[in-house]
């Protein structure tokens, strides 16, 4: 989100005019390409396929496989097309016009095959194998190799998810280069030499030992699945897909990942109404050709145990029993009508809905329930955040000048606030890593305001701007106040050196610099406001990167108490009128009063200020105070739950209506950029209904007709609602003209200046206490990762972190058990001594053994007690409990606190 | 290696080996024999003048490729904001080659003196000597020499009051043939897996730690002090026009007195054999390598080929490292070639397909042929495989692996065919052993 949107082409080519292009001929055809292009890329542009294995356009050239040999006029020897840069007037002959090239290629192919096993009939790659295909196109009909092939035990696991078959490997080094260059996780490498060269993890034991994992450092990279996809043979396979199918028996549907706001293009391969695997799609503007392992492997949750397939109603004995749709809808409508006509109904939508479904809830709340009590934020949130979303997020998309992935490539400086990209938006992490490593232009320098430098930050060659949780706003204000000209930035409550602040303040003033805010910034009082001030002072662009795939779309769809679809303020009379006209409802149909946030909805429900709740895809254990949420659900008169699976919400629901998982419906997610990522339905045989269809039927029972029966109808309605949005309120002013002072009077708004939130004085922990810092691991106990043990096996181990001084205060050293306690409960984890501020403790938010919200009811910035562990530090038994829960909805972790405190 | 006496007797141009009989590894001896005189002389000149001098001398790299040394030095870009490095390739691993190790063992200070002069000429303040991992003795002796040189201010800051400073690190490799390839050597020196790098960029601009780097062979560097002391014309008075200077030839195999023989470039095998006492008694020359296992075999008919860069190439082989391996008629060509290929199959770094897979395959084919289990088709398979390796592999190691196969079939096809038809090796397998009783057949 920009404060001052820049023109479309901000900084694509750094440094003046590009050098003149180069013209060459390939197989007699002339082509002009940019200087520096490789011959193999130029040939691709002409549609001349040159066989290759080691070449990959996103990896550095290596020239290892020698398959792409071409003849170049004037060269003594033929050259590899994948390593040869075009020159002016170059004359290239590929296998199509040069006997030398054709002979070299078939020779290399023969050599590649001498040690390749003839196990295509049982190989996962069979049917989509570059080696198989190119052996057909470039190889000999019969082998002259009569000797003994090199053999290995096969396969060996190099992580719980990835299996390695060394016999099949052609040693192209794509996987090792990906891991080293793209992911920054060089956990696999080539070992040995000659024909014995092999890919391996680092190991103490022989790879041939059956106990490979225990003796080794496994390939636990969040991006390991990409190596399987780019392996040109069947050497790397996944435990999930191995031996499950042949590619030609699968139907492939383009899809979009539902796991985070990165918005990866994917391909969903399915058969008999069941997803068999997912692959990264190719979208240069978003995920290039990569995705993370969560997106790739976490797709079993809709089919694992606990899926709800029919409507359920609560009978007299208090049990949920199967019901017909008409029966369930009737009961749900009755309950909601009664509550609506009494104190009202609150709507909690979670962060995992498609924009179509969010829009449907948004419309349903306003027109069927006559309320603005709707909030998608199933996590810690604040009033400040709601204002920030209105002022700096809603309406800002790539089309209206918003920040794009592409802009990260060329940003001179990126400041992260409350955001750990590798854990929370892995593709943003990959982009930043790429930007921080570029050699062809000045690389991006990354800074992170955080309590400690994570491995993710190290992989970005990033610099930590150390801050105790809760003091982030102080750091940002110091940056705002330091105009970069003198070196004396003074910050209270934090301890970064003034020189660092000055350097960063100056760096942020370079054109194209960016401040990226995570959803966790809402837990740092004043941080979002301070970030907005900083952006205004420095000219840096702002972007908000929430964790969940539905969050960004929910803002546009108006699933917020203050915001209507299309970046319209609830308090803006003209905006309401516009929407009422669009929806064909009577003037005044849309309630004029801003609604309650998630926390306030739950509080109201507990106090009978609301009589019913309509909840979609929320895991109560993600909320700031799960116990309070349970209490609210227990006490509120009526609960309707639209869910995939049995969850903490269905436990209290009076009516449960089953809904479709993302593969069972068409929909759209928004990337953090605000880029729409529409996708079609992958599994056509599923009879599960999308939320919007269920809401349409429910509304009809309430005698409200919403025209949301099909996804096309929803999309049409939504498109009309958001058409003409030109940016967020901060850049465009208000949408309507009817915003009189009278209407603003009773709201929580502080005005467009958006400067009313200041950081609070930082808390001062005593001995034996610490300020809590917490965020999610990408792979954790989230419910959307259910049913995939191979993936779970690669998740980082849950560890608690303290600095050495604080640990020794309570008599602990590295590896000891540390217990973190609040009034709500305690968590015990192994301690890892970490360089971080004194009296700060870090816990993973929702990893096995560390459900911070449920067990501690605490959030970043809270003061907790730390002491020597009272139980075994091994994480463990909490897993089952933590992993129960949501379906489409609130998945992963614990969330929220923070609300309006 | 052989005794110092034999060397002395056989040397015809005692330049590089002139001090060898006098225990020059002791610094006092080295200094008494004009040691470090070339350094003192060099430090009085400008670096550019030294580069020009070496250019004028026509000195060519002694590691095998014969690239003009002065020209290589002049490629280093100046003022790029990166340090310059000198890296000395002492990874002498080419089978048959035994010139650098004796030089480093006997006369380590001559290498250091050359290194200091070279570093001064190219503006390097840090030099590395990459010693083959198996040569612990040589690394130890070099380190001792470095300590002594440092103590006498031949190394360190402000060398001999010149204002020029240099430190030398003696780095032991881990015993991989590929690390004699200069870019693989640099990878290894940086702590990575020893595999060759893509070129370009070349080491002159992006060498060690992506900085301008000169990589030179031990013998090349050791030649430099003599050029400084005696001048380019003196150097060019030896050898041939395009390959001037003295050269240490390593002679091994079926000769009476194997060892190092320093001669002018352009000497012939016939002359060298005279120095080495001829082929062992009662035997005649069958084939030989002019420059190690990577150079195509020569036969008796090549006895008068001038052994300089041009002469060896014109006759269909290469000068290589001037490692003359002599094989008499008791040697089975298939068996000898198999041994060579076994070496390449073992030492291929594994990076590129042709070298890795081709040597793996050829080793098996040759083993079958040697055992009398081959077919005539195998010969065409071998030649075709060599065609698929030569010029297609990533670095010169693959090319080198084809030399013995192609040349052996070229000169001794009949002997291969005899293996196939007789279903066994036609020669007595033990007769070629160095200590085999003469006359056994």
Image: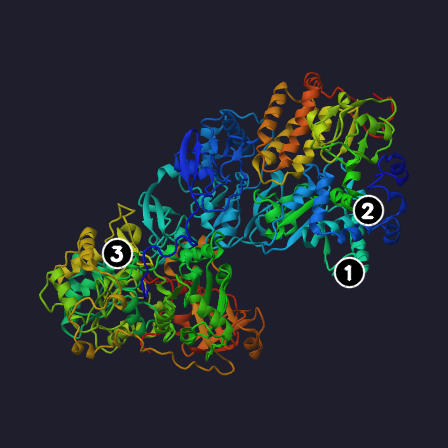
B253 in relation to A607, above or below: above
How far apart, in angstroms, are the residues tagged by discs 1 and 2?
A: 29 Å
Please indicate whether residue A56 sits to the left or right of residue A600 in the image: right
Instruction: Write down the residue under mark 1.
Output: B161
Please indicate whether residue A679 sits to the left or right of residue B32 in the image: left
Which label was assigned to residue A803? Answer: none
Viewer-side label of 3, 2 = 2
Task: Say which label, 1 or 2, has the lower sequence index.
Answer: 2
- Tag 3: Cα neighbours inside 10 Å, few (<14), some, or many (≥20)? many
- Tag 1: Cα neighbours inside 10 Å, few (<14), some, or many (≥20)? few
Q: Chain of mark 1?
A: B
Residue B39 in the image: state x and y as whole percent. Answer: 78, 51
Residue A398 in the image: state x and y as whole percent. Answer: 30, 57
Q: Chain of mark 3?
A: A
Residue A883 in the image: state x and y as whole percent. Answer: 39, 62
Instruction: Write down the residue under mark 2.
Output: B105
How far apart, in angstroms, are the residues tagged by discs 3 and 2?
A: 81 Å
SS at mark 1 in the image: helix
Both on one chain, marks 1 and 3? no
Instruction: Write down the residue under mark 3.
Output: A659
Q: Residue furthest left?
A: A586
């Amino acid at each position: 989100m920009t404060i001052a949107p820049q023109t479309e082409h901000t900084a694509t080519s750094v440094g003046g005019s590009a050098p003149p292009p180069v013209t060459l001929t390939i197989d007699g055809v002339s082509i002009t390409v940019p200087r520096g292009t490789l011959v193999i890329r130029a040939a691709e542009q002409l549609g001349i396929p040159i066989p290759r294995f080691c070449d990959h356009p996103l990896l550095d050239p290596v020239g290892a496989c020698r398959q792409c040999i071409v003849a170049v006029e004037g060269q003594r020897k033929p050259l590899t097309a994948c390593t040869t840069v075009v020159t002016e007037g170059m004359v290239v002959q590929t296998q199509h016009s040069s006997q030398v090239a054709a002979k070299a290629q078939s020779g290399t192919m023969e050599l590649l095959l001498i040690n390749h096993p003839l196990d295509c009939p049982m190989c996962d790659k069979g049917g989509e194998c570059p080696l198989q295909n190119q052996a057909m196109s470039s190889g000999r009909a019969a082998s002259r190799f009569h000797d003994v092939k090199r053999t290995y035990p096969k396969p060996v696991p190099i992580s719980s998810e990835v299996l390695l078959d060394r016999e099949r490997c052609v040693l192209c080094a794509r996987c090792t280069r990906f891991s080293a260059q793209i992911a920054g996780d060089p956990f696999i490498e080539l070992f040995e030499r000659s024909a014995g060269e092999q890919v391996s993890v680092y190991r103490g034991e022989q790879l041939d030992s059956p106990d490979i994992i225990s003796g080794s450092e496994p390939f636990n990279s969040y991006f390991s699945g990409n190596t399987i996809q780019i392996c040109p043979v069947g050497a790397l396979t996944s435990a999930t897909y191995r031996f499950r199918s042949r590619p030609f028996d699968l139907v492939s549907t383009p899809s979009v990942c539902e796991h985070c706001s990165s918005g990866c293009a994917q391909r969903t391969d399915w058969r008999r109404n069941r997803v068999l695997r997912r692959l990264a799609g190719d979208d240069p503007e978003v995920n290039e050709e990569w995705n993370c392992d969560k997106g790739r492997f976490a797709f079993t949750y809709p089919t694992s145990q606990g899926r709800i397939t029919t409507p359920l109603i609560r009978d007299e004995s208090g049990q949920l029993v199967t019901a017909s749709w008409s029966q369930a809808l009737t009961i749900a409508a009755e309950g909601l009508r009664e509550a609506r006509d009494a104190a009202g109904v609150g709507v909690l939508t979670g962060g995992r809905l498609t924009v179509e479904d969010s829009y449907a809830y948004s419309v349903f709340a306003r027109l069927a329930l006559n309320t603005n009590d709707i909030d998608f934020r199933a996590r810690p949130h604040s009033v400040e955040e709601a204002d920030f979303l209105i002022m700096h997020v809603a309406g800002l998309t790539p089309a209206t000048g918003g920040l794009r992935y592409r802009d990260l490539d060329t940003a001179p400086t990126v400041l992260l606030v409350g955001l750990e990209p590798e854990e929370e938006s892995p593709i943003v992490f990959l982009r930043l890593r790429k930007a921080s490593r570029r050699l062809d232009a000045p690389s991006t320098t990354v800074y992170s305001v955080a309590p400690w430098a994570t491995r993710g930050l190290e992989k970005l060659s990033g610099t930590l701007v150390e801050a105790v949780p809760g003091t982030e706003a102080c750091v940002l204000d110091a940056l705002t106040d330091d105009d970069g000209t003198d070196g004396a930035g003074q910050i209270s409550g934090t301890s970064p050196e003034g020189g660092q602040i000055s350097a960063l303040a100056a760096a942020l003033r370079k054109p194209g610099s960016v401040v990226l805010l995570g959803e966790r910034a809402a837990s740092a009082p004043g941080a979002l406001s301070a970030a907005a001030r900083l952006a205004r002072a420095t000219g840096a662009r702002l972007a908000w990167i929430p964790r969940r795939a539905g969050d960004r779309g929910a803002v546009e769809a108006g699933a917020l108490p203050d915001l209507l679809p299309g970046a319209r303020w609830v308090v803006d009379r003209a905006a309401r009128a516009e929407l009422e006209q669009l929806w064909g409802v009577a003037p005044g149909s849309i309630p004029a009063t801003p609604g309650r946030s998630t926390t306030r909805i739950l509080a109201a429900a507990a106090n009978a200020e609301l009589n019913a709740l309509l909840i979609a895809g929320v895991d109560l254990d993600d909320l700031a105070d799960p116990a309070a949420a349970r209490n609210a659900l227990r006490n509120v008169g009526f609960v309707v739950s639209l869910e995939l699976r049995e969850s903490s919400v269905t436990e209290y629901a009076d009516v449960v209506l089953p809904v479709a998982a993302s593969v069972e419906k068409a929909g759209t997610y928004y990337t953090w950029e605000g880029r729409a990522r529409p996708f079609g339905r992958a599994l056509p045989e599923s009879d599960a209904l999308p939320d919007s269809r269920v809401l349409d039927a429910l509304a009809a029972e309430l005698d409200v007709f919403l025209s949301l029966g099909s996804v096309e109808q929803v999309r049409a309605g939504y498109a009309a609602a958001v058409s003409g949005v030109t940016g967020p309120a901060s850049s465009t002013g208000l949408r309507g003209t009817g915003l009189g002072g009278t209407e603003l009077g009773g709201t929580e708004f502080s005005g467009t200046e958006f400067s009313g939130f200041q950081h609070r004085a930082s808390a001062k922990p005593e001995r034996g206490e610490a300020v809590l810092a917490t965020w999610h691991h990408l792979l954790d106990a989230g419910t959307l990762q259910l049913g995939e043990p191979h993936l779970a096996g690669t998740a980082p181990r849950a560890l608690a972190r303290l600095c050495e001084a604080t640990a020794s205060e309570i008599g602990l050293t590295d590896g000891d058990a540390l217990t973190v306690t609040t009034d709500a409960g305690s968590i015990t984890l192994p301690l890892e001594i970490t360089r971080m501020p004194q009296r700060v403790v870090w816990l993973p938010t929702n990893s096995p053994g560390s459900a911070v919200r449920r067990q501690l009811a605490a959030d970043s910035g809270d003061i907790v007690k730390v002491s020597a562990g009272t139980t075994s530090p091994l994480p463990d038994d909490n897993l089952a409990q933590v992993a129960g829960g949501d379906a489409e909805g609130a998945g992963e972790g614990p969330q929220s606190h923070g609300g309006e405190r | 290696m052989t005794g110092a006496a034999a060397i002395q007797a056989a040397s015809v141009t005692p330049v590089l080996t002139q001090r060898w009989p006098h225990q020059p590894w002791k610094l006092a001896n080295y200094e008494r024999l004009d040691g470090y005189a070339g350094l003192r002389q060099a430090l009085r000149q400008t670096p550019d003048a030294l580069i020009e001098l070496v250019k004028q001398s026509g000195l060519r790299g002694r590691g095998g490729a014969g690239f003009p040394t002065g020209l290589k030095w002049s490629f280093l870009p100046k003022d790029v904001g990166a340090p310059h490095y000198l890296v000395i390739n002492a990874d002498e691993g080419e089978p048959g080659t035994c010139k650098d190790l004796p030089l480093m063992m006997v006369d380590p200070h001559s290498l250091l003196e050359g290194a200091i002069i070279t570093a001064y000429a190219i503006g390097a303040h840090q030099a590395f000597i990459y010693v083959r991992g198996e040569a612990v003795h040589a690394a130890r002796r070099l380190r001792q020499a470095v300590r002594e040189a440092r103590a006498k201010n031949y190394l360190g800051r402000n060398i001999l009051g010149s204002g020029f400073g240099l430190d030398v690190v003696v780095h032991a490799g881990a015993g991989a043939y590929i690390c004699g390839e200069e870019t693989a050597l640099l990878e290894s020196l940086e702590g990575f897996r020893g595999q060759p790098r893509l070129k370009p960029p070349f080491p002159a601009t992006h060498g060690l730690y992506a900085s301008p780097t000169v990589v030179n062979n031990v013998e090349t560097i050791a030649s430099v002090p003599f050029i400084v002391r005696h001048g380019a014309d003196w150097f060019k008075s030896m050898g041939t026009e395009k390959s001037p200077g003295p050269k240490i030839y390593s002679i091994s195999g079926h000769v009476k007195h194997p060892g190092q023989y320093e001669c002018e470039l352009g000497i012939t095998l016939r002359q060298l054999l005279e120095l080495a006492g001829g082929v062992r008694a009662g035997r005649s020359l069958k084939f030989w390598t002019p420059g190690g296992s990577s150079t195509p075999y020569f036969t008796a008919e090549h006895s008068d080929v001038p052994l300089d860069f041009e002469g060896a190439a014109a006759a269909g082989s290469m000068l290589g490292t001037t490692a003359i391996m002599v094989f008499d008629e008791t040697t089975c060509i298939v068996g000898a070639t198999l041994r060579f290929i076994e070496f390449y199959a073992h030492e291929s770094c594994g990076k590129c397909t042709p070298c890795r897979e081709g040597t793996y395959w050829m080793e098996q084919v040759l083993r079958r042929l040697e055992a009398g289990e081959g077919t005539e088709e195998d010969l065409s398979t071998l030649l075709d495989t060599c065609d698929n390796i030569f010029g297609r592999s990533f670095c010169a190691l693959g090319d080198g692996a084809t030399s013995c196969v192609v040349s052996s079939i070229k000169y001794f096809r009949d002997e291969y065919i005899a293996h196939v038809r007789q279903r066994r090796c036609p020669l007595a397998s033990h007769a070629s052993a160095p200590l085999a009783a003469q006359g056994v057949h």
